[in-house]
Amino acid sequence: MARSSSGIVAGLTVVAIAAVGFLGYQASATAPAHPPKAAAAPPAAPSPVPSAHAAEPAKPVAVPPESGTGSRVVYSVSQKRVWLVGEGAQEPKSFAVKPSTAHPKPGTYLVNSRSGAVTGSDGVPIEHVVRFATADGVVVGFSSRVDGQMPEPDQSKKTGGIRMARADGDAMWAFATINSKVVVLP
């Protein structure tokens, strides 16, 4: 009896190790690859001398009243800003973005696809892609460049990537799942 129970334990151990290995592979296959850290950051500019009248911290930018209700992503093309508006009394997260060259028409859309890491329509590696519209024959969505940069888009190309800082891209990825509402304002 002892011999057969040790065989069962050994078999269960093998199955458990295989399951953990498979789950580890699955997690690594879907996680976006981050580039290696830069060797050294450039020296910081000297801090200005504080004045007697220090500036107040920036107040949050209010969610536009014409953006609807309920949980939603609000994107204002003219303000170059996004708000992640959840349910309840939680303060919405808001951040600046770099609009794409192809702009969706004002209206309400649903997130229709997402990708952890791909190459953008501008040829740049991007992550946390949240797609919701098509404009001028180009798929439009939110994303972050893997290199962390946010340059102005090349106006001579039709691109659909509304770019944001990587930390904001992480927040968008967590918030805007499939079928989440996206309200686009002019």
Image (tube, grey):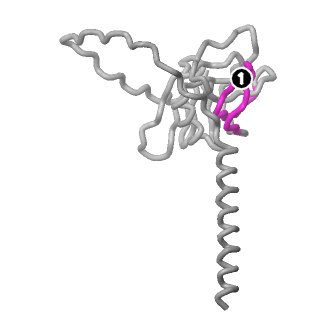
The answer, for residue 179, to whether it is visible in the render is no
SS category of the residue bearing label 1 = loop
Q: Main secondary structure of the magenta part?
A: strand
Report x, y in % for residue 48. 29, 9
Residue at the far front: name it.
3
**Left or right of 52 in this view: 184:** right
Report x, y in % for residue 158. 76, 16
Q: In which quarter of the image is the C terminus?
A: top right
Report x, y in % for residue 133. 72, 30
Report x, y in % for residue 185. 60, 25
**Left or right of 172 in this view: 114:** right
Circle count: 1
**Which amino acid, by three-letter code, is at mark 1?**
Gly
Q: In the figure, 74 relative to 42: above or below? A: below
Q: Residue sitting at 57 percent across and 39 percent down? A: 72
Residue 124 counted in the magenta span: yes
Q: Residue sitting at 64 percent across and 24 percent down? A: 162
Residue at the far right: name it.
137
Q: In the figure, 147 relative to 11: above or below? A: above
Nearer to me, 3 or 60: 3
Residue 74 counted in the magenta span: no
Instruction: Give the magenta-colored segment's residue range.
Output: 114-134
Q: Image quadrant of residue 152? A: top right
Q: Image quadrant of residue 100? A: top right
The answer, for residue 27, to whether it is visible in the render is yes
Nearer to me, 35 or 76: 35
Residue at the far left: name it.
52
Q: Name the residue under label 1.
A: 160
